[in-house]
Image: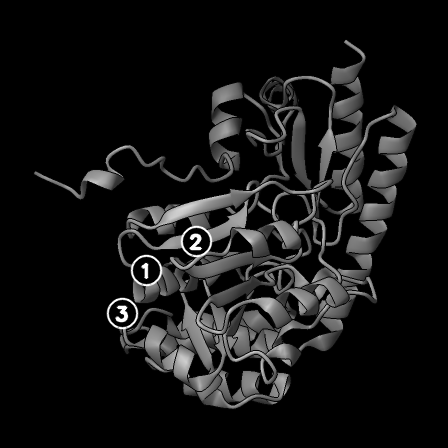
Amino acid sequence: MLPKPHIVNLPVYQPGKPIEDVKRELGLTEVIKLASNENPFGCSPRVQAVLEEEIANISLYPDGSAVELAGALAEYHHVNSDQIIFGCGSDEIIALIARAFFLPGDESVMADQTFSVYKSNADIEGAKSIEVPLKDGVHDLEGMLQAIGPKTKIVWICNPNNPTGTIVPDSELTSFLDRVPEQVLVVLDEAYAEYVADPTYSDGISLLEKYPNLIVLRTFSKIYGLASLRIGYGVGQPGVIKLINQVREPFNTSRFAQAAAKASLADLEFVATCKARNREGIRYLNEQFDRLGLEYFQAHGNFIMVNVKTKATEMFQSLLRLGIIVRAGFPVYPNHIRVTVGSAEQNAKFISALEQVLLK
């Protein structure tokens, strides 16, 4: 078998270690997973009811265009239905964008420590990734602007950035968008937007009318708590969305996912509660890191990146043995771990384990 030569050495994405695997391997009765930025408070109670109704339709294909969900989202975001595309998580939208726009030899601009799926999909399509170093964990938009050249097709901005959790303020983002060449597509990934409380943060969807070369990504996996159902979406100008839809596989989101997403979108109280509890968790973790003398990036999503003053991969293993799963292995930040903001109980157990390891 002869695959594309440029994919042979591509790394395989490594998800967070499954809880059941850790329990079995280490003989633990309790394991807390704080590695994948999942919502520790679950999903809206309305979801279970609609999923029970959908069981009767399990033999039927889903609506390939997700018309009802698109209508609900269009109303929610004050856009038109033809401005929305759905994917199996926003990850698939990223893959579809790469498939629709990249030719071998094209260039793509991104931060040097950001969501790895941007680079992996550019690699798959034979595009070259130009990675611009972060500044104190934040996108260097001026540096990214300078990196745009005649071969640049797409610029990726993760806001809040994964894994650092930092944000680009509205003034810097709009200044950047004002100067990006109109033929370059800017993908603004706002997977964690619903968690942000900072008043300087942009609502990327509100910028679409002014910037036709912009597409905004959102997901139901994070604050809405539907990670297992895999549904995300992109919002852009109709012409851009049409091009991406042309390379989308039919029936790429399930009936269950569409029904759950629509129910979740209507439960604003649940979202507000999750946001408030997440901010409480961030305050607690910040206080504890300060007490322990650990530096961290200002968190705006539902995770924090903290410098543990030792090899993060070793800290990962030490915490794992105590039943705490975090994320490590970030090349630019070899001494940092990324930890999801959990429930109050989970956060306290994480701090207890972290302190235990640090005092060894």
Residue 52 visible? no
The residue carrying mark 3 is 249
Q: Nearer the viewer, residue 301 or 134?
A: 134
The residue carrying mark 2 is 108
Q: How is the image coloured?
A: one colour
Q: Nearer the viewer, mark 3 or mark 1?
A: 1
**Residue plotted at (82% across, 54% down):** 279
Residue 98 visible? yes
Around disc 3, counting alpha carbons within 10 Å, would you say few (fewer than 14), some (14 to 19), or many (20 or more)? few
Q: Earlier in the sequence, mark 2 or mark 3?
A: 2
Residues under labels 3 and 1: Cα distance? 18 Å
Q: Position of residue 344 (x, y in %)?
A: 80, 45
Q: Are the residues tagged 2 and 3 within 8 Å (C-beta)?
A: no
Is residue 171 toward the left or the right of residue 187 in the image? right
For residue 95, what is the image quadrant? bottom left
**Residue plotted at (76% across, 48% down):** 299
Residues under labels 1 and 2: Cα distance? 9 Å
Q: What amino acid is found at the position of numbered circle 3 in the picture?
A: Glu
Residues under labels 2 and 3: Cα distance? 24 Å
Q: What amino acid is found at the position of numbered circle 2 in the picture?
A: Ser
Q: What amino acid is found at the position of numbered circle 1 in the picture?
A: Phe
**Residue plotted at (85% across, 52% down):** 280
The residue carrying mark 1 is 102
Q: Earlier in the sequence, mark 3 or mark 1?
A: 1
Q: Earlier in the sequence, mark 1 or mark 2?
A: 1
